[in-house]
Structures are given as C-alpha cells and as structure tokens.
Image: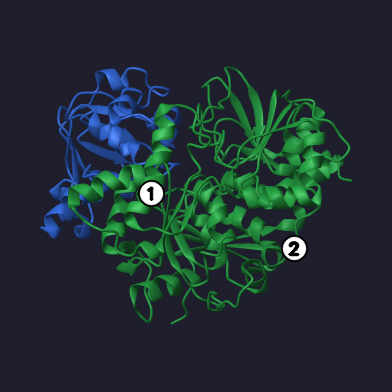
Chain colours: A blue, B green
C-alpha cells in the first residue's frame, strides 16, 4: 500500500521499454520505469500503489506497460488522468485504475488505501480522505473477475 | 438532433439511430487489424486458453511490420508465429513484409468510409482519415474482439480542428500536428474524437490526411476523423459513401488554425509537445536524419524529402525506411527513390524500423537525430542519452543537407 509517486506524461516506453518487448513479462517488468526511478522495479512491494500525474501511460498500445506494473505486484493505479488506451488496457488486465483530481496530494511513501468501488482514497498515516472516480459499473465485474481474459473464460463456460 | 461524424459512425456500429456523447454502447466490429508484436503471439495462447475461435476470420487483417527484418531467435519466432497462426485460423488477409500496417491496410483496400474498425496499435486512428471510426486497443481487448466481434465504447465528444487557408510551401501535415500537440498538449484530445475539417483539409492529399489522423495518438484523442470526399474516393479507386458531420452538430471544443500562417515546426527532446517553429531553433548540429515510420515515410513524405534533396548531398547520416513496399516501388519508378539514394541515403526495410525501438537499428549513446517519426520519448529509439528532434520530411531533409537543424523553406527548388 506504499505510494510510488510519478509526474505528468509518464509514457509507455518508460513503463515497458521497446528493446525488451520481445521478452517475457518478467524481463520487461525488471526494467519497468528504470529511466524515471531506478529503484522502483527493485524495491516496489506487492500491494504498493502507483500514483501518476496527468496523462499517465501516454503513447503505445503495448499492454506490457500495465502488465509489467501488475507483474511487480502493484495493486492499484491512481492518476490525475490516464491516457485512454492505457486505462482500458489496465482494467482489461484486472489492474484497478482510478482517476483522481487530487492525486497530487499523495506523497512518495504515503500508505494509501484505495476503494475503487466507492471512489475513495485514504492516506492512512495522515488520516486524510478524498474522492476519486470509481471504476465504471459496466467494467466492475470484469475487474473483479481478474480482467477480460478471466471474465471471458467465465462467460464461455 | 444534429450528429457529428463520430456519433454517426458509432451509432451505425451500435445498431442505433443516434447516440449521445458519454453513453456506453457496444459496437459490432467491421475490421480488426493486428501486427506481429501485439497480434498472433499474444492472441494465440489466450484463444487456446479459452478454447475459442476467431468470430470472423474474413474481418481480420494481419500485417507483419514490427520485428522485420527479424534479426535474432526471438524476433524470428515472433514472425513465425504470425505466419503459422493466419493459416491455422484461416485469415486470408495476411500481408507479410509489405510495409507498416497503417499504410498497408488502406493501400490494399481494406478501409471504407462508414466502417467501425480496431487496430492492435496506438497509431490505428490513421484509418479515421477515410471517414471510418478506427482506434487502437491492447492485446487482451483485441482478444475480446476476436472472440465476440464486439467492443464497448463510451460515445466520444468531438473536438473540432478547423484548418483554414492552405499549407505554404515546405509546410506539411506533420507541422500541423506538432503545432497542435504543442498547443493543446499530449492529452489535448482528451480521449475523444478529433475531427479535422476546413478548407485546408479538403485540399490535402490522402496520405497527408493520414498523417493528421495518425498523430491524433500523440494528441491524446481516441481517434482522428476526416469526412470522406472525392479525394477519399480517388485514393480508394471505388465508389464510396459520404460520411460527414451534420452542419452545426454540437462539439466539445473547436480550435482554429490558419494553415497559410503556419511555419515548419520542430519538437525538441523528449516530447512531441515540446514544439516550436523551426525559426526559434539554434542550428543544432545533427548526427543522423531519419525518414521512416507510418507518420513520415509514405510516398507523399518521400516526395517531400526528395524535393529538398534533389541535386544535394546529406552532411549527416541519412536513413530512409519507406513505409510500404508499394510506396517504395512507385518512388523507384518515378525517380524519387534515386534522388534520396543519390543524396546519400541508406535504405532500410519497409517496416517500423528505428521508430518503435524494437529492431536491430537503434540510436547509439549521445546521438543527436532529427526524425519524421511521431514520438521522441527518452530512450524510445535507442540510448536514453540520444536526443531526437521531430519534424516534417521537408525539415528533416533540409537539416540533413545543412548538417544542423534548418528551415526547409530556404532550400525549396
């Protein structure tokens, strides 16, 4: 639940660098965001949350960008805004992703809880809560199922 | 109720008489395009896990472009999977090493005005230049399309770009987009439909229109759209339907730009939004000029570069990767290619080349390059220390001749 805070316009080439795109997700994930924060991929812990500024995930359609974050154990993505294609990709992989106008109130290292169904973010140690956009209702079941692949698997059974 | 082009296209695909921006709809997909990187190698294992079949192989187009030429075991394997998968699934629309997907798709007649299409690549809005709704999706979302033939959509608002006048000599669609991205930001499109219209658009040839819609990705739109007209018909060489916005259909925003007043633009490292007019730049010394990608190496782009390079020599290393084999063949026949080669160009394959940073050609440490591609994110085309400036084919060619960033208007023949 520790927050890793990034700035505006973090692009997919930074999240999943092109030269590793031939490789399996383990390799791509080990280079995730290395050009922005060299410690991130090494030190991020399962359950941590990634916080972005404006237009997080701008650029490519490469799904390996949210997949790398998910592989590292990131539990949720919060940003002032997301690039639309990245946003769809993240939810399709079952990675809870919410837009929050007040995302910049979250500081590096804050312990945060994200209620993506109610649309509420809490900074635990500071006892601050504020609202975020919940995950849209028509996508909630897919996210609960663990993403589009698992959702389709359930539907086709 | 007056409807925009985007609303009309989405309504048709959703089987409704009209739709309202913000409404969630399910659309039937007329065409799904994938390439070697996001396509078969990702779709095949997921389809097998679901034990599902492709909903309609006749509506699927597979084009290899990212890992060509294959240069190691992994890239050879990715291409092999694509070649085998189309046979397994029964996809007849397979274009292997014919060029970049966004260019090959309309070139081979797969796009028509009125269609609703998805592509497994972020530059898929290129198809919107044909009066079709086309946008990019990731591999898992594409799997959903392959299994169901459908996709959900939040009906977009329209952001209108009104382009008056006419582009001056040495100024291109690429300059329009760099200017707009600089002015509105990489999220200026707000994941809505960006429609380009006005007198300057009607005068633009099809491949220049494609550049506008292509770089709508960098503007942050879901798709870029241009109403179909006689130019569309001539390019497709067939009868077409006219798809256009109703006059006075409400739009979210409208931005005007007088094309006649626009100077060549350059985006400095490391963002396409980091744009200024070429006249604002110092003569920054360059190592490499790159003419490549779906954004900047179509036939129209090669001709722009040749108009500057004719009878001149490049002082920098000059690399040209024509966006499609067919465009290269026309360029060869008409003499355009010879002009480029005589100027000292090295010719690369008809593929994504250096643009995506997936292949064997990457920028070395500290390289300073000027490029016709769409993105100059740090490290995208190679070393993180490389500096990439984005510009039109005119400006890239003029800068190659000068050895530094240069205004192409001074070299027009």
Q: For this view, does B337 lie left or right of residue A42?
A: right
Residue B328 in view: yes
Residue B137 percent across, percent down from the top left: 38, 51
Q: For this view, does A13 lie left or right of residue B348?
A: left
Q: For this view, does A38 lie left or right of residue B113?
A: left
Q: Residue at x 29, y 31 (%)?
A: A25
Location of residue B351 (image quadrant) = top right
Q: Which mark is residue A85?
A: 1
**Which one is in front, B321 or B266?**
B321
State the residue position of label 2. B165
Q: Quadrant of the N terminus of chain B?
A: bottom left
Q: Residue at x 24, y 47 (%)?
A: B46
Residue A34 percent across, percent down from the top left: 38, 22
Chain containing mark 1 = A
Mark 1 vs mark 2, CA separation in Å? 33 Å
**Which one is in front, B357 or B58?**
B58
Chain containing mark 2 = B
Examine the rendered structure and indicate whether residue B28 appears above or below residue B67. Answer: below
Callout 1 environment at 10 Å: few (<14), some (14 to 19), or many (20+)?
A: many
Residue A91 percent across, percent down from the top left: 26, 47
Q: Residue at x 34, y 79 (%)?
A: B16
User: Mark 1 near mark 2, Cβ–Cβ under 8 Å?
Assistant: no
Give the SS element for disc 2: loop
Examine the rendered structure and indicate whether residue A14 appears above or below residue A43. Answer: below
**Which one is in front, B302 or B210?**
B302
Residue A135 percent across, percent down from the top left: 22, 52
């Amino acid at each position: 639940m520790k927050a890793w805070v990034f700035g505006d316009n973090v692009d997919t080439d930074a999240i999943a660098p092109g030269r590793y795109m031939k490789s399996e997700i383990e390799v791509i994930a080990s280079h995730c965001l290395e050009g922005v924060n060299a410690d991130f991929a090494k030190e991020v812990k399962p359950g941590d949350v990634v916080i972005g500024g404006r237009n997080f995930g701008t650029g490519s359609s490469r799904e390996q960008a949210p997949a790398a974050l998910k592989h590292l154990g990131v539990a949720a993505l919060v940003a002032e805004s997301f690039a639309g294609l990245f946003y769809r990709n993240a939810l399709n992989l079952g990675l809870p992703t919410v837009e929050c106008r007040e995302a910049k109130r979250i500081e590096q290292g804050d312990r945060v809880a994200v209620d993506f169904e109610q649309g509420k973010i809490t900074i635990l140690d500071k006892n601050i809560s504020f609202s975020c956009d919940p995950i849209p209702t028509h996508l909630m079941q897919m996210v609960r199922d663990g993403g589009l692949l698992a959702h389709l698997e359930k539907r086709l059974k | 109720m007056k409807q925009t082009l985007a609303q009309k296209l989405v309504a048709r695909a959703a089987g409704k008489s009209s739709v309202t921006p913000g409404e969630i709809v399910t659309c039937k997909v007329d065409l799904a395009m994938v390439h070697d990187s996001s396509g078969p190698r990702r779709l095949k294992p997921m389809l097998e896990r679901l034990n599902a079949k492709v909903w309609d192989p006749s509506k699927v187009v597979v084009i290899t472009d990212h890992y060509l030429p294959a240069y190691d075991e992994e890239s050879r394997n990715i291409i092999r999977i694509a070649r085998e998968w189309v046979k397994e699934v029964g996809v007849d629309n397979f274009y292997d090493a014919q060029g970049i997907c966004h260019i090959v798709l309309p070139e081979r007649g797969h796009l028509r005005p009125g269609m609703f299409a998805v592509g497994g690549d972020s530059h898929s809005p290129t198809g919107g230049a044909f009066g079709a709704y086309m946008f990019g999706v990731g591999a898992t979302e594409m799997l959903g399309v392959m299994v169901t033939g459908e996709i959900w959509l939040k009906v977009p608002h329209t952001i209108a770009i009104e382009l008056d006048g006419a582009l001056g000599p040495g100024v291109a669609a690429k300059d329009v987009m760099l200017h707009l991205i600089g002015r509105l930001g990489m999220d200026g499109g707000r994941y809505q439909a960006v429609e380009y219209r006005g007198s300057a658009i009607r005068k633009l040839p099809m491949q220049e229109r494609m550049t506008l819609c292509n770089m709508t990705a960098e503007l942050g739109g879901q798709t870029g759209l241009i109403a179909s007209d006689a130019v569309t018909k001539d390019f497709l060489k067939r009868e077409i339907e006219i798809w256009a916005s109703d006059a006075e259909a409400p739009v979210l925003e409208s931005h005007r730009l007088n094309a006649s007043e626009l100077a060549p633009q350059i985006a400095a490292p490391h963002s396409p939004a980091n744009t200024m007019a070429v006249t604002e730049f110092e003569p920054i010394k360059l190592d490499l000029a790159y003419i490549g990608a779906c954004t900047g190496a179509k036939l129209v782009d090669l001709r722009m570069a040749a108009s500057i390079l004719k009878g001149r020599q490049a002082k920098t290393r000059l690399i040209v990767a024509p966006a499609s084999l067919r465009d290269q063949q026309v360029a060869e026949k008409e003499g355009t290619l010879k002009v480029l080669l005589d100027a000292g160009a090295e010719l690369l394959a008809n593929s994504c080349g250096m643009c995506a940073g997936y292949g064997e050609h990457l920028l070395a440490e500290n390289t300073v390059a000027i490029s016709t591609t769409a993105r100059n994110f740090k490290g995208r085309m190679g070393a993180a220390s490389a500096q990439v400036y984005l510009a039109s084919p005119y400006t890239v060619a003029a800068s190659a001749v000068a050895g530094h960033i240069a205004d192409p208007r001074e070299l027009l023949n």
